[in-house]
Amino acid sequence: MGSLFRSAEMTLCQLFLQSEAAYACVSELGELGLVQFRDLNPDVNVFQRKFVNEVRRCDEMERKLRYLEKEIKKDGIPMLDTGENPEAPQPREMIDLEATFEKLENELREVNQNAEALKRNYLELTELKQILRKTQVFFDEHEGGAANNPTESMTRALISEDSIARQTGPVQLGFVAGVILRERIPAFERMLWRACRGNVFLRQAEIETPLEDPSTGDQVYKSVFIIFFQGDQLKTRVKKICEGFRATLYPCPEAPADRREMAMGVMTRIEDLNTVLGQTQDHRHRVLVAAAKNIKNWFVKVRKIKAIYHTLNLFNLDVTQKCLIAECWVPVLDLENIQLALRRGTERSGSSVPPILNRMDTLEDPPTYNHTNKFTSAFQALYDSYGIASYREMNPTPYTIITFPFLFAIMFGDFGHGAIMALFGAWMVLKEKPLAAKKSDNEIWNIFFGGRYIIMLMGCFSMYTGLIYNDTFAKSLNIFRSSWKISNLTYDYVKTITTSHMLDPATDDYAGDPYVFGLDPAWQLAENKIIFLNSFKMKLSIIIGITHMLFGVAISYFKNMHFNNRLNIICEFIPQVVFLTFLFFYMVILMFIKWFMYFASNKKEDFTVGTRCAPSILITFINMVLNKPTPCEEGCLTSNMYAGQIGIQKFLLFCAFICVPWMLLAKPLLIQRERKKSALHPLNHNQLHSATENGDASEPIHMNNTQAQPPVPAGHDDDEPMSEIYIHQGIHTIEYVLGSISHTASYLRLWALSLAHAQLSEVLWEMVLNKGLTVEGWAGGIAVYIIFSIWACLTISILVLMEGLSAFLHTLRLHWVEFCSKFYSGGGYAFQPFSFEIILELAGQVKEE
Amino acid sequence: MAALPFIIFTVLWGGIGIVLPIIVPKGPNRGIIQVVLILTGVCCWLFWLCCYVAQMNPLIGPKLDKHTIMVMAKAWGDELK
C-alpha cells in the first residue's frame, strides 16, 4: 500500500555516539529531520544537564543578535535574506561567533552612548540658542522702552513706594531664563504666581520647531521663559519651582554685548557638534549595514547550535564517559538515510569509531508519522485536528481528498460560485512560490493559503454539482434542449390562465427522455420547483450518505485485517454491514425502484404504476420497521413495489435485528470462552487434584489462576475485566445502532444546505440584480452599474465566503462524526522529528509575533 | 434513446474511474492518484446518475405561469396556436 494509507512503520532505536562525533552526527540528523529523540533523563533538572553551559552561551548570543536586529530595524536598513541555509558550525567556531557578536554589541553600545551624550549636548546648546534669541526681544522692550513703557510701569507697580524711596536710581531686577515643556506652562505660571504672591514677572515664548529628547528619541515641544524678580529670597524660590517643574535654566548675561558674544559662541559650538554627530551616525550606520548582511545567517547558525545542544542534553552518558547513548523513534524505511547521515557526521568530526544504531524491541506505541506532500498535508491536517491516527491504522486522508470537496460541493452547488472559488484556489496554487515566500502574518490569509488545494478542489466540484443542479448564480443554462415544451396549449387558453398551469408529464409536454446532463432548465422557471427539488435532493443526500457510511464500514474491514483481528471482523464488521445494508441500503434500492417503475400515464392499465399509486419511500420504510402494512389508495390494489415485498422486508428486518445481539454479545462471549480455555489449559494434575478434593472446581481454579500467572496470555487486547468488556461492547453497539439512524438523518444536511444556498442566491438575484435589470432607458445602464456592484459584493461575501464556510464546517462534521466513527480510533500521538527546518520556522514565527 | 446518455456518461466516468487508475505511471504517489481518480469517477457518476434517473419518469411536471409559458413557447420553439 502507498505511503499515506497508513502511517509509516516506526522502530525504536538505540544510538551510541562517540563523544567527539556526537555533535556532528546530531547536526546531520537535524538536517535530515527524520528522528525523534526521547528524553533519557526526564528526572534531571534542566540546569543540571551536561550541556547547559553551551545552551546558555547560545541564549546569550541570540540575545545579542536580537539587540542588533532591533537596532537595524530602528535604522530601517534592509536585512539581506539570501534564503541560504548554512550548516551548523563546528563547536569551536562558536567562540569566534561569540567574539564577533561581543565586539559588535560593544561597539554599538558605545556608539549609542556617545551619540546620546552628543545629542544631549546638542539639545542644551539649541535650547540656549533659542533662549538667547527669544529673550533678546524681552530685553529690547525693557531697555529701549520709555518711562511709560508697559514693562517699566509694571516693574514699578511691583515695587512698593517706600522701597523706591529707599533706593535711588533704576530698580535692579534679577532674572532667570530657561526652557520648559510647553504643556507645563500654565501650571508653572500659576505656581509661580501663588508661591511668590504675584511678585514675579514671567514672559514666555514658544519654540516653533520640536526638539528631540535624547533619552527617548521623541519629538517634544518646548517654550522659552524668562522670570524677573527682585531679591535673593525670591530668586531661590523661583529656582526651586523651576527645578520642580523640570525646567532647564541657562545662564544669560545681562549685558547685550555679552549676550551677542555668547550667541556667536553657541552657534559655532553647534556647528562643531553637528559634524561630530554626523560622523557618529555614519559610523553606526556602517556597523549596522555590515551586520545586516550576515544577521539572518548568524541567527540560523546560533539556533542550530542551540538545538543541537538541547538534543544532546536528552542523551545519556555512558559509564566510561566516552560515548553518548540516545534513544529515538525512526521510520523503518528511512533507516538507511539515517545511517548515511551518521556516517557523514562521523567523517566530518574526524572520529574513527563509527556510531552504532541498534533496533530495539518495545511494547510502547510508536508515534504516528504520515508522509505528506504539499497537496496532501492540508487534508491530513483536517484529521490531525480531530485526533492523530493510532499507529498504523487506516488513514482516512487519501479518501477525503475527493469525498471532502464532493460533499462540500453538494451543499455549495452553483456553477458561478464554484467558479469563483476554483479560480481563487487556482490562483493561489499557481502563484504558490511567490506567495509562500512573502510569509504573511495575517492569520486568515494563512489559513486560506494553507488550504489552497482544498479550496481549488471544492471549487471544481462545486462547478460540477452546479452544472448538475443547473444553477449558475441562480439561473439555469439550456444547453441540451429542455425535455419540457409547450405543445398542447392554444393562445386563447393561455390567456385565461390566472395562476399557473402544470405541464402534464403524461402527454407529449414531456419529450420522453430526461435532460441529458443535470436538472431540466424548465424547473428553474417552475412554481413547484422546490417540491421537485426537495424530493430529488433528499433522496440524493440519503443515497450519498449511506454510500459514504458503507465506505467507512468497509475501511474498518481493512483496518481489522491489518491488525489480524478476526474477532472484530466476525463480531463487528459483518453485523455492522448487514445492519446497514439490510435496512438503509435497502431504502436506497427502494428509491431506485420508485424512480424506474412509476411514471405518469393516462392509460388505464398503467394506473397501478402511475402518479397516484407511487408509494412514499419514507412511509414504506417506517412501516417496514414497525412491521405494519402500508395503506394504499383505492384502485392501486397494493402499496408494494414488487411481488413478495412484505416477505423480503420481514426477512431483512429479522436479519437486521439479529445483528444487534450479535454485535452486543458475540465478542465478549468469545473472549470469555477464550479466557476460560486458557485458564484451564495450564492446570497441572496437582491443581486439578486439589480442586476435585474440594469438590468445587471453579473457585480454587480461579484463585489459582489469578495468583499463579497474572499476565493473561496474548490473544486478548489486554487484561481488562470482563464487566468492562461487556460495558464497552454495549456502548459500542448502542452507538452504532442508534448512530446508523441519526447519521443517516444527519446526511440530510446535504439537502438542507444546498436548498438554503440555492434559495439565497435566488433571493439575491430577485431582490437585488433584478431591480437594476428592470429599469428602462439610459438610466437602466447606470442602475445596473451600481446594483451589479452591490450584487457582486453580496455574492462574494455572503454566498461564497459565508455559505462556503458553513458548508465547509458541515462537511467537516460529516467526515469527523459520520464517516470517522465507523472505523477511526485516532488514539495516536504525532511524530515530532528533530528537524532544523521546523525549529527555524518556529523561531521565525515567535520573533514576528 | 434514454440509454444513450447513460452509456456516454458511464463510459466517461468509467474511463476516469477505472481506466485511468490502471495507466497511472509508477511513482511514490501512484496509490493516492489511483484513489483520487476512482473516487472522482464514482462520486461524479453517482451524482449524475441520480439526477438523470430522478427525471427519467417524472410524476409531476413544472407548474408555469402565463408569462413563462408564452416566453417559453416563443424562445424554445413551439409557437402557441
Image (cartoon, coloured by chain):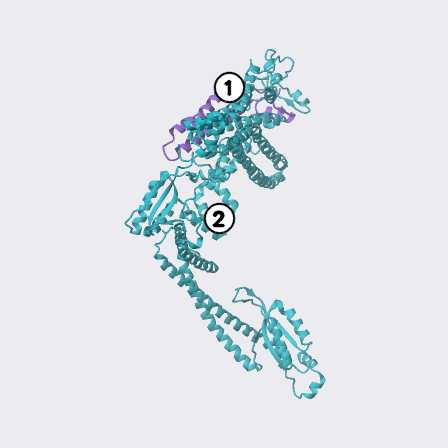
Chain colours: A cyan, B purple
For the N terminus of chain A, the image quarter is top left
Numbered marks: total: 2
Rendered position, A796 above or below A192 = above
Asked if labels 1 and 2 share a chain, the reply is: no
Task: Answer yes or no: is residue A776 visible.
Answer: no
- Nearest the viewer among A706 and A818 is A706
Task: Answer yes or no: is residue A213 visible.
Answer: yes
Furthest residue toward top: A605
Q: Quadrant of residue A830?
A: top left
What chain does mark 1 sit on?
A: B
* Three-letter code, disc 2: Ser
Q: Secondary structure at mark 1?
A: loop
- Left/right of residue A617 with respect to residue A839 in the rendered view: right
Rendered position, A114 above or below A299 = below
Furthest residue toward left: A352
What chain does mark 2 sit on?
A: A
- Left/right of residue A357 with respect to residue A230 in the rendered view: left
Q: Secondary structure at mark 2?
A: loop
> Which residue is labeled 2 in the image?
A440
Q: Quadrant of residue A192?
A: bottom right
Residue B55 in percent (x, y) is at: 55, 22
Residue A162 in percent (x, y) is at: 71, 86
- Nearest the viewer among A818 and A252 is A818
Residue B25 in percent (x, y) is at: 37, 32
Rendered position, A769 above or below A693 = below
* Three-letter code, disc 1: Ala
> Mark 1 near mark 2, Cβ–Cβ under 8 Å?
no
> Which residue is labeled 1 in the image?
B2
Eye-nearest disc, 1 or 2: 2
Q: Residues within 10 Å of mark 2 (few under 14, many from 20)?
A: few
Furthest residue toward front: A693
Q: Residues within 10 Å of mark 1 (few under 14, many from 20)?
A: some
